[in-house]
Amino acid sequence: MKEPIKQYKPKEPVSDIFREKLKLPDLKKESKKIFKQVNCPSCSQPVGVDHINLDKSLAKCGACHVIFSIEEEVADLKIKEKIKEEFFRPEGVDLFFYKGDMEITVKQPVHWIDSFGGILLPFIAGFSFFICYDKGYSLFVPTILVAISLFFIYRLITYLKAKTFIDVNDQYLKIRHRPSNYKKDKTFAAEDIDQIYLKHSSVNSGYFILNMIVNGPGGQTHQELVSVSTISKAKYLEQEIEKYLGIEDRKVPEATA
């Protein structure tokens, strides 16, 4: 007599097996915040935030009432925060390395005066030409406006495709504008570049100008490097050029951004 066929029964549900394999231990997320605890140098007790004056870099111990300086702790914290800060490449900026040389390509912004002159001024010139012709007035002023409009249209077209090239190596830093738009190419010795800093454009507050402090025989001079449309581009360019040339960033009185 044949024995009845036994059905296989797993010791535990298949779903439970896979559930056990997929279950991962909880991972502790490390905090990326940089912090500093202030302890009293006299009694080693921690000092509460209500006993700390960051503006004057002074602290008072709530236990033994000793007043002491925390200037070193504050400076160390600022340095760590500065080192931690990093800017990533924004759109409109390209960076290449070839045989140790660094080449940066920056798309140039269109200034508001060129936008006005290349877009609105032609309509104003055309309207004034029509009015003067219809009323029998002299066409001298409309003709001048048309000529100015053509000039701004040309500038607008060139600026839409304008780029600035910054070539950097251990010998020099060279700036090239293509098309030039009446801007000359400039070359500076790398060893003479002391600092890179940012300023708001005096022509348009929405733009930022990257400047250099250059050491020369007669003293330091401030040279304009390139203008950009966003603070992200300006900060990234400052970061990469200073890092490549080994320049330690510091505060510049003329900086406004």
Image (cartoon, rainbow, N blue to C red):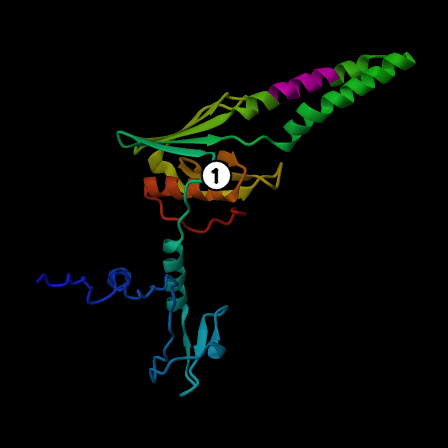
Q: Position of residue 3 (x, y in %)?
A: 11, 63
For this orientation, the residue located farthest to the bottom is: 64
The image shows residue 1 at horizontal and vertical percentages of 8, 62
Identify the residue at horizontal 49%, vertical 70% (top origin): 56
Can residue 71 be seen at all in this image of the molecule?
Answer: yes
Seen in the image, is 11 located left or right of residue 154?
left
In the current view of this chain or complex, which residue is farthest to the front?
1
Q: Which residues are magenta?
A: 146-155
> Could you tell me which residue is drawn at 52 percent across and 30 percent down?
108
Q: Which residue is nearer to you in this view: 14 or 60?
A: 14
55 up-or-down from 66: above or below: above
Is residue 188 or residue 202 the one in the foreground? 202
x, y percent for residue 54? 48, 69
Q: Is residue 147 magenta?
A: yes
For the residue marked with disc 1, what is the amino acid? Asn
Most common SS among magenta residues? helix
Q: Is residue 22 above or below residue 203?
A: below
| Left/right of residue 7 with respect to residue 49 in the rendered view | left
Please tell me in which quadrant of the rendered image residue 229 appears.
Answer: top right
* Residue 155 x %, y %: 60, 22
Task: Give the secondary structure at mark 1.
Answer: strand
Query: Is residue 161 covered in magenta?
Result: no
Give the residue drawn at x 83%, y 15%.
130
Residue 137 showing in the rendered view: no
Which residue lies under the disc numbered 1? 211
Residue 51 shown left or right of residue 100 in the figure:
right
Label 1: few (<14), some or many (≥20) within 10 Å?
Answer: many
Give the residue displayed 51% in from the left and 21% down from the top. 180
